[in-house]
Amino acid sequence: MRKYHIPAKFFLPLCGLLILVACSRKATDFRDFLGNTEVQYPGTVSGITVYPGNGRLAIGWKPSPDPSISKYVLYWNNRQDSVVINATSHKPTDTVRCLIPGLSEYAYTFFLYSYDAAGNRSIVTEIDNAHAYGNIYRSTLHNRLPDAGTPYKILDDGSVRLYFSLPDTINIATNIKYTNAAGIAAVASITGVQDSVTLPSYKAGQPVVYQSSYIPSRGALDTFYTNNYDTFPDIFKLVACDKSLFQEHDLPNDMGIYQSDTRVSKLWDGSVGPQGYPDIFHSDDRGSDAPLPRTLTFDMGKIYNLGQIEETGRNCCNNPAEFEVWGIADISNAATSLPGTDPGWAAEMSSKGWTLLTTAIRGDDGNAPMKFNLIPQAPPARYIRIRVLRTVNNSNSVNMSEITMYSKE
């Protein structure tokens, strides 16, 4: 590469000539390239807000204060679709809002320009991730769940208060349909920030159904409902069954009694709290000759829709720590041949028409009264069979003070 050196005596005159030439250019000489005109850029907008909706959306913005702006043009779908909005205000405190219907469920990108009357266009304002929603979003929605611990309470005035768990998204409301005490269809509603609602008049035994509504984000145009109603857990009050109708009804392989005054009928003599010997049911004491599990059976005297059992132990010992409760409406041909210790006993019970209503497990000494809920939608039952699986002190002898059965009403 050759290098050329400019002698110092020529350098300063050359620089002065270049400066003179540069300064001789006018600031408007670029117009020669633009048809003797300047590029005009109308003012851009501010405060963009997107309002999502169902197959549509709206875009809002604060207008530019530039008084030359005559319209705005909004493009989407790779600029294949557009809408023109006339500029009617230039106050930045106002809001321009454009509704765009007929959209597929998608996240769109919009391009917004300001135009003046001469057709000059502003720098683009790009609006990304603008959502239109539809059936895909709706399919992800679920009805608000009833509170797992306390789904409802029956109040003293006969009204019912329903309890719901907290929603996990932007829940607007949950609409509830039920039948009131007069037999007329009624509606109640609970908002997303409430956890309970009262049905002022409810007809017992009638179903309650509910449906929740949501919005995809704050400021959404439309509210979305779940696809289906759900059924609320059965609402009922529990009433103690009439113990005056209870009778003993031994079946093969049931426990014997310790003596004549410790019979099964002691379980419904109306005693309150743990009782002492002999005011208890006390099974025969055959030790290792009669290991657990063992059974006892009784007749409630009529058919009930059962919801709960309460068991009270003896005031000292031999109380059940774990037991099963079985029920059946008709005892005809329901007797089993296998002892409670047989691995096939439960299968034989089921084959005879018995239903396992609950498996009760106590974690205490078994003395105090303790209630156990029965399975939902339990079939009607008149006869009860209890199989004691183990006692708190691992004795084969079984003692109890009282059994109370509760029906749904």
Image (cartoon, rainbow, N blue to C red):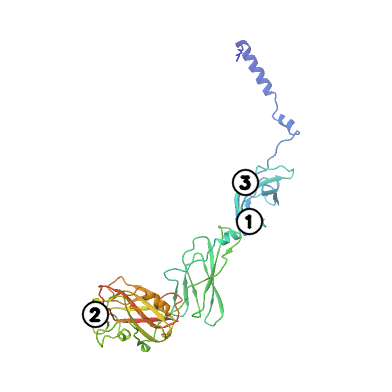
Disc 2 secondary structure class: loop
Please state which amino acid type lies under the numbered disc 2.
Arg
N-terminal of the pair, mark 1 or mark 2, is 1
Mark 1 residue crowding within 10 angstroms, few (<14) / some (14–19) / many (20+)? many
Would you say 58 lies left or right of 336 here?
Answer: right
Which numbered marker is on residue 49? none
What is the spatial separation of the Cα atoms under label 1 and label 3, in whole angstroms? 16 Å
Q: Would you place residue 287 above or below residue 12 in this image?
A: below
N-terminal of the pair, mark 1 or mark 3, is 1
Q: Which residue is mark 1?
A: 57
Q: Position of residue 299 (x, y in %)?
A: 37, 86
N-terminal of the pair, mark 3 or mark 2, is 3
What is the spatial separation of the Cα atoms under label 1 and label 2, in whole angstroms? 80 Å
Relative depth, front residue between 20 and 74: 74
Q: Would you place residue 84 above or below residue 26 in this image?
A: below
Q: Are marks 1 and 3 in contact (CB under 8 Å)?
A: no
Mark 2 residue crowding within 10 angstroms, few (<14) / some (14–19) / many (20+)? few
> Looking at the image, can residue 68 be seen?
no
Please state which amino acid type lies under the numbered disc 3.
Glu
Q: Which residue is mark 2?
A: 286
Q: Would you place residue 58 above or below residue 112 in this image?
A: below
Q: Position of residue 271 (x, y in %)?
A: 30, 84
| Mark 1 or mark 2, whichever is nearer to me | 2
What is the spatial separation of the Cα atoms under label 3 and label 2, in whole angstroms? 88 Å
Residue 371 placement: quadrant? bottom left
Residue 188 placement: quadrant? bottom right
Q: Who's the residue at 55% across and 76% down the image?
A: 186
Q: Are marks 1 and 2 in contact (CB under 8 Å)?
A: no
Which numbered marker is on residue 126? 3
Relative depth, front residue between 39 and 345: 345
| Mark 3 or mark 2, whichever is nearer to me | 2
> Looking at the image, can residue 228 be seen?
yes
